[in-house]
């Protein structure tokens, strides 16, 4: 039998993580000691090993719960997660291409190529970016380099009012 800290150490997990798993019913201790400490069996250890393996693969808690309670759902859940990862990878590759293109433009100087707002938005959409991804891009730009973000927006030929509105929407009052 394992006490909570012993079991946590085996998998590099904190006591609070195991308490959370207990609270949500993902991993309940087999019993309690006379001093009312949680005690975990070898079967509990094996279940936690499976939980950790699934978490390392990026599965959500609810998916893990389904996998552990319904082994017949394994293929569907894993296939769905694989498709989600494909989408995430595609979105990251599109962002990577955009950044590489931006670096090439930057190397030649912003003045060498003029891109207006409509062209820029069309390029982002063509690269697979959704409205939510574009909003996230603006938030990130604004948080990392607010003045450069403003300069970039103005370089697209938009008004200062529209640039201010975009920046405010990105989480910063201009």
Image: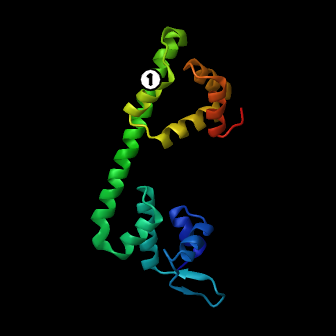
The crowd level at tag 1 (other Cα within 10 Å; few <14, some 14-19, many 20+) is: few
Can you name the residue that lies furthest to the right here? 173
Task: State the residue position of label 1.
Answer: 119
Residue 156 lies left or right of residue 90; in this view the side is right
Residue at image position (47%, 65%) is 61
- Under tag 1, what secondary structure? helix
- Closer to the camera, 23 or 135? 135
Q: Where is residue 78 in the image (x, y as percent from the top left)?
A: 32, 60
The C terminus lies in quadrant = top right
- Closer to the camera, 80 or 14? 80
Residue 99 visible in image? no
Q: Where is residue 169 in the image (x, y as percent from the top left)?
A: 63, 39
141 versus 50 height, above or below: above
Total count of labels: 1
Q: Position of residue 90 (x, y in %)?
A: 37, 39
Residue at image position (45%, 67%) is 62
């Amino acid at each position: 039998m394992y006490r909570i800290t012993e079991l946590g150490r085996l998998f590099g997990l904190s006591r609070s993580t195991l308490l959370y798993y207990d609270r949500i019913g993902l991993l309940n201790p087999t019993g309690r000691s006379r001093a009312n400490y949680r005690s975990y069996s070898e079967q509990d250890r094996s279940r936690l090993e499976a939980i950790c393996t699934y978490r390392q693969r990026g599965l959500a808690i609810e998916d893990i719960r389904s996998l552990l309670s319904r082994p017949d759902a394994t293929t569907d859940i894993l296939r769905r997660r694989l498709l989600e990862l494909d989408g995430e990878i595609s979105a990251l590759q599109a962002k990577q291409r955009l950044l590489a293109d931006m670096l090439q433009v930057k190397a030649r100087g912003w003045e060498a190529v003029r891109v207006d707002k409509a062209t820029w938005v069309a390029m982002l959409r063509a690269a697979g970016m959704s409205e939510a991804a574009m909003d996230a891009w603006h938030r990130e730009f604004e948080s990392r380099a607010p003045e450069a973000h403003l300069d970039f927006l103005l370089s697209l030929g938009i008004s200062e009012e529209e640039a201010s509105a975009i920046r405010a929407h990105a989480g910063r009052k201009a």
